[in-house]
Image (spheres, rainbow, N blue to C red):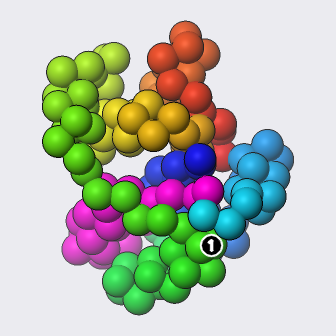
Protein backbone atom coordinates (compact mmCIF):
# COMPACT_ATOMS: atom_id res chain seq x y z
CA UNK A 1 0.00 0.00 0.00
CA UNK A 2 1.16 3.53 -0.81
CA UNK A 3 -0.03 6.58 1.15
CA UNK A 4 0.34 10.00 -0.47
CA UNK A 5 0.80 13.00 1.78
CA UNK A 6 -0.57 16.40 0.79
CA UNK A 7 2.57 17.63 -0.96
CA UNK A 8 2.75 14.45 -3.03
CA UNK A 9 -0.88 14.98 -4.05
CA UNK A 10 -0.14 18.56 -5.11
CA UNK A 11 2.89 17.46 -7.15
CA UNK A 12 0.85 14.83 -8.96
CA UNK A 13 -2.06 17.22 -9.55
CA UNK A 14 0.16 19.92 -11.03
CA UNK A 15 2.40 17.58 -12.98
CA UNK A 16 5.41 18.87 -11.11
CA UNK A 17 8.51 16.74 -11.09
CA UNK A 18 8.72 14.05 -8.44
CA UNK A 19 11.86 12.18 -7.52
CA UNK A 20 12.40 9.01 -9.54
CA UNK A 21 11.75 6.41 -6.83
CA UNK A 22 8.50 8.07 -5.73
CA UNK A 23 7.34 8.60 -9.29
CA UNK A 24 8.01 4.96 -10.20
CA UNK A 25 6.28 3.77 -7.02
CA UNK A 26 3.11 5.77 -7.70
CA UNK A 27 2.95 5.24 -11.47
CA UNK A 28 3.72 1.53 -11.14
CA UNK A 29 1.24 0.93 -8.34
CA UNK A 30 -1.23 -1.90 -8.78
CA UNK A 31 -4.89 -0.91 -8.85
CA UNK A 32 -6.26 -0.28 -5.37
CA UNK A 33 -2.86 0.12 -3.70
CA UNK A 34 -2.69 3.93 -3.56
CA UNK A 35 -4.35 5.72 -0.66
CA UNK A 36 -5.14 9.32 0.24
CA UNK A 37 -6.04 10.35 3.77
CA UNK A 38 -8.97 12.60 4.61
CA UNK A 39 -6.28 14.63 6.38
CA UNK A 40 -5.12 15.80 2.94
CA UNK A 41 -8.65 16.94 2.12
CA UNK A 42 -8.61 19.01 5.30
CA UNK A 43 -5.12 20.42 4.62
CA UNK A 44 -6.00 21.32 1.05
CA UNK A 45 -9.19 22.98 2.23
CA UNK A 46 -7.21 25.05 4.73
CA UNK A 47 -4.59 25.94 2.11
CA UNK A 48 -7.31 26.87 -0.36
CA UNK A 49 -8.97 29.07 2.24
CA UNK A 50 -5.65 30.89 2.60
CA UNK A 51 -5.57 31.82 -1.08
CA UNK A 52 -2.33 31.11 -2.81
CA UNK A 53 -0.83 29.17 0.11
CA UNK A 54 0.05 26.25 -2.19
CA UNK A 55 1.63 28.65 -4.68
CA UNK A 56 -0.38 26.97 -7.42
CA UNK A 57 -3.69 27.75 -9.09
CA UNK A 58 -5.52 24.47 -8.75
CA UNK A 59 -9.03 25.75 -8.18
CA UNK A 60 -11.36 24.29 -5.56
CA UNK A 61 -9.84 21.18 -3.98
CA UNK A 62 -13.20 19.41 -3.97
CA UNK A 63 -13.14 19.37 -7.79
CA UNK A 64 -9.57 18.49 -8.70
CA UNK A 65 -8.90 16.21 -5.72
CA UNK A 66 -11.97 14.09 -6.45
CA UNK A 67 -10.82 13.76 -10.07
CA UNK A 68 -7.25 12.92 -9.05
CA UNK A 69 -8.36 10.24 -6.60
CA UNK A 70 -10.50 8.72 -9.34
CA UNK A 71 -7.70 8.87 -11.92
CA UNK A 72 -5.29 7.14 -9.53
CA UNK A 73 -7.89 4.60 -8.45
CA UNK A 74 -6.95 5.63 -4.94
CA UNK A 75 -8.72 4.72 -1.74
CA UNK A 76 -9.72 7.56 0.58
CA UNK A 77 -8.90 6.66 4.17
CA UNK A 78 -10.72 7.98 7.21
CA UNK A 79 -8.96 8.50 10.51
CA UNK A 80 -9.78 5.52 12.70
CA UNK A 81 -9.83 5.73 16.49
CA UNK A 82 -6.60 3.67 16.57
CA UNK A 83 -4.86 6.06 14.20
CA UNK A 84 -6.11 9.12 16.10
CA UNK A 85 -4.80 7.72 19.40
CA UNK A 86 -1.48 6.67 17.88
CA UNK A 87 -1.02 10.14 16.39
CA UNK A 88 -1.80 11.72 19.74
CA UNK A 89 0.53 9.54 21.79
CA UNK A 90 3.47 8.82 19.44
CA UNK A 91 4.69 12.18 18.20
CA UNK A 92 8.23 11.13 17.20
CA UNK A 93 9.12 14.81 17.46
CA UNK A 94 6.62 15.84 14.79
CA UNK A 95 4.93 19.13 15.66
CA UNK A 96 2.48 19.20 12.76
CA UNK A 97 -0.64 17.23 13.73
CA UNK A 98 -1.27 16.34 10.08
CA UNK A 99 2.20 14.79 9.79
CA UNK A 100 1.55 12.81 12.96
CA UNK A 101 -1.69 11.50 11.41
CA UNK A 102 0.07 10.59 8.14
CA UNK A 103 2.73 8.61 10.02
CA UNK A 104 0.18 6.88 12.25
CA UNK A 105 -1.95 6.00 9.21
CA UNK A 106 1.02 4.64 7.26
CA UNK A 107 2.07 2.51 10.22
CA UNK A 108 -1.51 1.31 10.79
CA UNK A 109 -2.02 0.11 7.21
CA UNK A 110 1.62 -0.93 6.67
CA UNK A 111 2.03 1.57 3.83
CA UNK A 112 4.94 3.44 2.31
CA UNK A 113 4.39 7.16 2.79
CA UNK A 114 5.27 9.39 -0.17
CA UNK A 115 6.39 12.76 1.25
CA UNK A 116 8.86 15.63 1.09
CA UNK A 117 8.71 16.27 4.81
CA UNK A 118 12.25 16.08 6.18
CA UNK A 119 11.18 15.09 9.69
CA UNK A 120 9.12 12.17 8.35
CA UNK A 121 11.96 11.09 6.07
CA UNK A 122 14.28 11.13 9.10
CA UNK A 123 11.80 8.89 10.95
CA UNK A 124 11.95 6.53 7.99
CA UNK A 125 15.74 6.44 8.15
CA UNK A 126 15.44 5.58 11.85
CA UNK A 127 13.07 2.71 10.98
CA UNK A 128 9.87 4.11 12.51
CA UNK A 129 7.89 4.29 9.24
CA UNK A 130 8.44 3.43 5.58
CA UNK A 131 8.70 6.54 3.44
CA UNK A 132 9.95 7.63 0.03
CA UNK A 133 10.97 11.17 -0.81
CA UNK A 134 9.01 12.84 -3.55
Question: How many marks do you count on the picture?
Answer: 1
Q: Where is residue 121 shown, x and y percent of the image? A: 55, 27
Q: Secondary structure at mark 1?
A: helix
Q: Nearer the viewer, residue 120 or 127?
A: 127
* Residue 37 lies within the magenta run: yes
Whether 21 is drawn above or below 35: the answer is above
Q: Left or right of 46: which side holds 7?
A: right
Residue at point 47%, 51% (across, down):
5
Which residue does the numbered mark 1 point to in the structure image? 72
Q: Where is residue 99 shown, x and y percent of the image? A: 35, 38
Q: What is the quadrant of residue 101 in the picture?
A: top left
Residue at point 17%, 31% (across, down):
85
* Residue 20 lies within the magenta run: no
Q: Residues within 10 Å of mark 1 (few under 14, many from 20)?
A: some
Q: Is residue 131 visible?
A: yes
Q: Nearer the viewer, residue 38 or 49?
A: 38
Residue at point 54%, 67% (across, down):
74
Q: Left or right of 113: which side holds 104?
A: left
Task: Please give the range of residues in magenta.
Answer: 33-54
Q: Left or right of 80: which side holds 69?
A: right
Amino acid sequence: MILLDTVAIILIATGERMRGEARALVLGAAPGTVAVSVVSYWELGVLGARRGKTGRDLGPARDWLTALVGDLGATVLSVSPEVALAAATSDYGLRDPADRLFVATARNIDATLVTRDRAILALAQAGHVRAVAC
